[in-house]
Image (spheres, grey):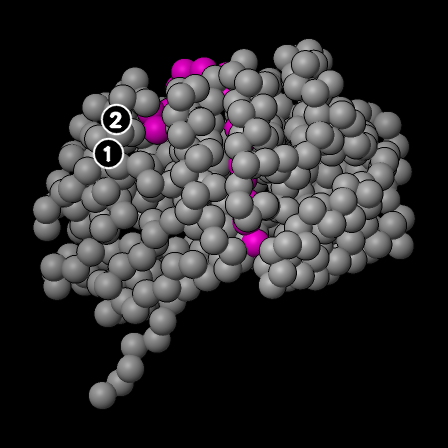
Amino acid sequence: MVRRPHISNWARNQRFQPQEIARPASEDELGAVVASATAENQRVRVMGAGHSFTAAAVTNDTHVTIHDLDQIHHVDTGSGKVTVGAGITVRALNRLLDGHGLALANMGDIDKQSIAGAISTSTHGTGLAFTGFGAQVVGLRIVDPSGAARDIDANNDPEVFANARVSLGALGVISRVTLQTVPSFRIHAIEQPEPLDEVLDGWRERIDTTDHFEFFMLPGSQNAMTKTNRRTDEPPAPLSRFGYVRDKILAENIGFDLLCRVARRWPGSVPKVSKVIDAASGRREYTDRSFDVFTTPRMVKFYETEWSLPVDAIPDAVREVNAMARSLAAPIIFPIEVRATAGDDIPLSTAHGRESGYIAAHVYQGTPHDEYFANIAAIARAHGGRPHWGKLHNETAETLAGLYPEWDRFQAARAAADPEGRFSNTYLDTVLGSQSL
């Protein structure tokens, strides 16, 4: 008997054995895979880079990886519209765009995701004048349950397009993405420690007056590491190679991983470890290409939960999270990240209809997190929070429906695009509602 291989995500907290594994090298092959699964009455789930912490890609039926659908199909430097294969990573896309004098208007601090995965889970960056990935999408090519592909945009099947920009893959398999990009730009960055209370007291002013503002804090700490990023025409003045390796690789990854291992093995050492991390935080100032400032190497594996709140709820919510963290029997040493974005009109976007602030909490891989994440969820829900679609939470369709004003609109689009639930799985049945095969 041939043993089926296991598939796991990046964080290795999701592991499964699909009946069929497909790696199509073209859109025609992708369509054939989907058509075959439909003929055999199997469900289909797609994995890009596997950077979701949830079971969104888990299936016992047909598993499709889109790594090879990473082609560049069209670049229009005049309009800024760029069409790429759904499997291209954000990292590769950034370098492609830079070669054409273009850039993403906004992005998060990790670039390992596939562009389709980043879109489908409502991935975002920071900056109150800027949206997440979904609202930068102006066109998609999507494969339906029959295996047929069609191009959709605001004029061609606009209802499916409006919903497919954040859909967890529930409306079909995305094979191409057309993005509205902007001319390439540089960012002047200042990273420095500041008192947490001062940062929270000035939260609204900071996000109103800074192009891209965010901060990190150790749970229970009185300090924050702020990142104030301003778009600029100044000449580049990047970190030296030595400084980059020392700070971004040795300190923030190799050294931090070692401290996390110590804390996981000897939980009583956490207070001392936290002091070491706080003491290591220093000031940096540099100017570099936008994507080199937005993104940071993330070599340390972790688990994450993230919640989107009304932006003005952030100071109170952060203070409540911080007080809760101090009460935990097992302290956490992995930083919390806090950001903000503009609202958008995508039905399942975590920023739908409102300016949004985000609280992202992490724990080191293999560290117990149920109590910590559940407490954060309770605080976030009390402030009208919505969980990130690609990060850990325990919400269901029943609890999520009231958080999204256009929930029923999405459900109607889902029923029309995939009436049999071909593109669902147990996780989607839980968070979006069940569809029978």
> Can the viewer see residue 177?
no
Q: In the rendered image, which residue does mark 2 sit on? A: 401
Q: Quadrant of residue 265?
A: bottom right
Decide which of 178, 323 is in the foreground and name it. Answer: 323
| Residue 349 on the magenta span | yes
Q: Is residue 259 above or below residue 413?
A: below
Horizontal and vertical percent for residue 218?
66, 39
Q: CA distance from mark 2 to mark 1?
A: 6 Å
Looking at numbered disc 1 in the image, what kind of residue is underneath it? Answer: Ala
Left or right: 368 in relation to 407: right
| Residue located at (67% from left, 31% from top) | 215
Horizontal and vertical percent for residue 66?
41, 57
| Residue 360 on the magenta span | yes
Q: In the rendered image, which residue does mark 1 sit on? A: 397
Decide which of 304, 50 is in the foreground and name it. Answer: 304
Magenta stretch in the rendered image = 345-364
Looking at numbered disc 2 in the image, what kind of residue is underneath it? Answer: Ala
> Can the viewer see residue 358?
yes
Indicate the secondary structure of the residue bearing disc 2. Answer: helix
User: How would you rate the neighbour count of disc 1 (Cα within 10 Å): few for under 14, some for 14-19, many for 20 or more?
Assistant: some
In which quadrant is the N terminus drawn? bottom left
Q: Quadrant of residue 301?
A: bottom right
Horizontal and vertical percent for residue 360?
54, 36
Question: Cβ–Cβ below 8 Å for labels 2 and 1?
Answer: yes
Indicate the secondary structure of the residue bearing disc 1. Answer: helix
Decide which of 285, 358 is in the foreground and name it. Answer: 358
Q: Residue furthest bottom?
A: 1
| Residue located at (70% from left, 20% from top) | 197
Q: Is residue 204 above or below residue 108?
A: above
| Residue located at (63% from left, 47% from top) | 333
| Residue located at (47% from left, 48% from top) | 369
Numbered mark located on residue 420 in the image: none
